[in-house]
Image: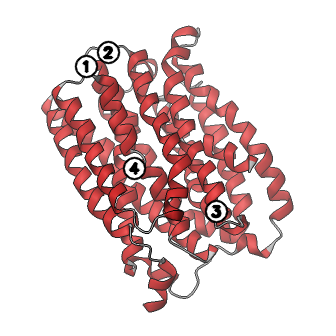
Amino acid sequence: MTAVVLISVNLRPGASSVGPVLAEVRDGVGMSPAVAGLMTALPGLCFGAVGLLAVGLARRLGMTVGISLGLLAVVVGLAGRAVTGSVAVFLLLTALALAGMAVGNVLVPAWIKRHARDGGVLLMTLYSAGLTAGGALAAALAAPVAGLSEGGWRPAIGVWGLVAVGALVPWVLIARREHTDPADHRADAIAGAGRLRHSPTAVALTLLFGVQAMNAYVQFGWLPQIYRDAGLSGTQAGALVSLLTALGIVGGLTMPTVIARSRTLAPWMVAFGVLLVGGYLGLLLAPATLPWLWASLLGLSGFAFPTSIALIAARSRDPRVTARLSGFVQPVGYGLAAVGPFAVGLVHELTGGWTLVLLLLMGSGVVMTLAGLRVSRPTLVDEELART
């Protein structure tokens, strides 16, 4: 339980801590607007590309060793990028840290499914809440720490490399105990698991996860700038993003239990879409008038994130199917998500404003709702694979 909580807190700060100090980072390393747009897309790119390799890594080395190596990459990447003055090195170390997080994203749900005695409800609750808590803390503390410390933005983003050391220790201890257990290496395919694209539930879950993740990383990367362009300070913008992500803690604590006890999640899926559209509409019409309200609406729509994460375990029975499903949903979903932040930067640069960006993001809320309605049915991916 300690290991799950600690790793969950460390799988998001590498992405969410940069947004509130993006302008300072750009000035500090001489980063162009186009490169800054690429950097905001890196979480989705790395989570997608590296996530595809995570199951193979677990099959060869074991899930616990794979997770431990991922955390080591997080430590090195986050600490190293805080001391470099090179744009290329900064991007490479950021990619290294995000690659380590990608391994954890895919393998931890499968590891939980293997060990949990209650189907994973308790550990998935802690894991989902920890993911959002880590993202919220990193976003909230970035600007204040940058303003108070002599090093400016460098300590604000580098401190998370030290925090990740605390998560690495228990996972190394667990890996020493479990790496010789054959069950720790059983992330390989079972009959039909390679045909996940033929499972309607798996495809719908991937689309739900991808659209949600796209919005999340657009918000991490660009929402602070939207607020700053509306006249708010960097500290205020960071606090608003922190509020948005902190609300996800409530979702992380509640949604796994809701999923376990509900016959259908359809009303929740509709609510997620309505809240997402409402939050972007507020940013379009009056971003600085009621900024806390718009951030709150977007934060509540973010309940879709712990929902989609928890559904990976809830919509599968065999831990090996869970591993394959996680290795399918998250990499493909993050691949879709990677397009969002880059496209936002491009559209914003071409139009010189946020109107078209926000209209397109509102449309994504409709897509997310439709995918959510399909995956809300209590169908197991195992059964769909057996039928194929």
**Residue carrying label 3:** 120
Q: Which mark is residue 232?
A: 2
**C-alpha span from label 3 to label 1:** 41 Å
Q: Amino acid at mark 3?
A: Gly
How far is disc 4 from disc 1 in space, using C-alphas? 25 Å
Disc 3 or disc 2, which is closer to the eye? 3
Q: Which mark is residue 356?
A: none
Give the mark nearest the N terminus, 3 or 1.
3
Q: Are marks 4 and 1 in contact (CB under 8 Å)?
A: no
Answer with left or right where residue 64 lies relative to residue 144.
Answer: right
Q: Quick one: SS at disc 1?
A: loop
In front of the other: label 4 or label 1?
1
Q: Quadrant of residue 73?
A: top right
Task: State the CA–CA distance, disc 3 to disc 4.
Answer: 22 Å
Q: Position of residue 136 (x, y in %)?
A: 51, 33
User: SS class of the residue under badge 2?
Assistant: loop
The residue pinned by badge 1 equals 288
Residue at point 20%, 36% (across, down): 281
Q: Earlier in the sequence, mark 4 or mark 1?
A: 4
Q: Residues within 10 Å of mark 4 (few under 14, many from 20)?
A: many
Density class for disc 1 (Cα within 10 Å; few <14, some 14-19, many ≥20) is some
Side of 385 relative to 123 (left or right): left
Residue 227 versus residue 365 in the image, above or below? above
